[in-house]
Amino acid sequence: MVPKCVLAGVFVCMSTSAFPASAPYAVEHKARGLVVRIASGRDEYASIGSYDIRVYTNDGADFVAGLVHPRDGEVVRTWLTEDESPKALRVWVWTCSAGSGAYGNIESFELVGDKLVKVPIPEPSAELKAGYMGHDSFDVRNGKLYRQFPVYRQGDANVSPTGWNRRLELDIRRQDAVWRPTARSR
């Protein structure tokens, strides 16, 4: 029997994530007279690499701050949030790992003067992560970070959870915030 992945006599059984991403993530956000550009690294693998955050003033003319940060997975979405204080601006980056688990990760960076400083985000408690096997989604709105993932029961395959979707929220305005289930979460 001849393998189905033979092309012109050469085996081509490689994951597409082993090749550089054809269209790297790149987005531009604007807030408070600042332009924030976020992009995954050029010519990097889709499954692992880096992303950069660059902040400019005057419609992108003057550089204010920037960083390059490692990533495990692809950049899915980014947000900007503004605090009550006049200069507090946060950048949020959601990544999703390659593979069947599609584990989500969210990172946040605050603009402090001319630096982007990583803001620690607590992990949910073991009780809230019971049945967790990846497939996260995130949203940032109205001063809260939302996280949702399917709950797996004993014996569930990674591709077919039989539980419900757990929804958690974190009040990002509080430094001592902890993850809490939303009213719709079981």
Image (spheres, grey):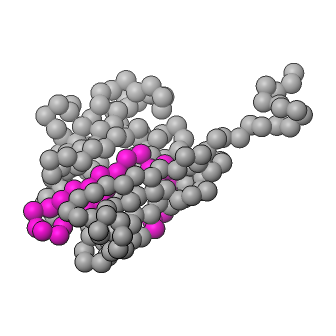
Above or below for 58 versus 6: below
Judge whether residue 55 can be spotted in this image.
Answer: no
Q: In this view, does 126 lie to the left or right of 82?
A: right
Q: What stretch is highlighted in magenta?
A: 68-94
- Residue at 13% x, 34% y: name it: 183
Q: Main secondary structure of the magenta part?
A: strand
Determine the residue located farthest toward the left in the rendered image: 84
Q: Residue at x 41, y 45 (%)?
A: 76
102 with respect to 8 (left or right): left
Q: Is residue 86 magenta?
A: yes
Q: In which quarter of the image is residue 16?
A: top right
Q: Is residue 109 above or below residue 154?
A: below
- Closer-to-camera residue (66/8): 66
**Along the line of sight, the residue nearer the viewer: 165 or 129:** 165
Residue 114 seen in the current view: yes
Q: Is residue 77 magenta?
A: yes
Snapshot quadrant of residue 103: top left
Q: Where is residue 40 in the image (x, y as percent from the top left)?
A: 49, 56
Q: In which quarter of the image is the C terminus?
A: top left
Instruction: Point out residue 47 in the picture as x, y percentages from the top left corner.
Output: 56, 49
Q: Which residue is drawn at 30% across and 78% down?
A: 114
**Quadrant in the picture for the N terminus:** top right
Residue 138, percent across and down? 31, 44
Q: Which residue is drawn at 78% across and 30% down?
A: 5
> Residue 123 or 34: which is nearer the viewer?
34
Q: Which residue lies furthest to the top in this view?
A: 1
Residue at the right extreme, as displayed = 9
Residue 46 in the image, given as x and y percentages of width and height:
56, 49
Q: Quick check: 2 above or below 17?
A: above
As rendered, which of 33 and 121 lies closer to the eye?
Answer: 33
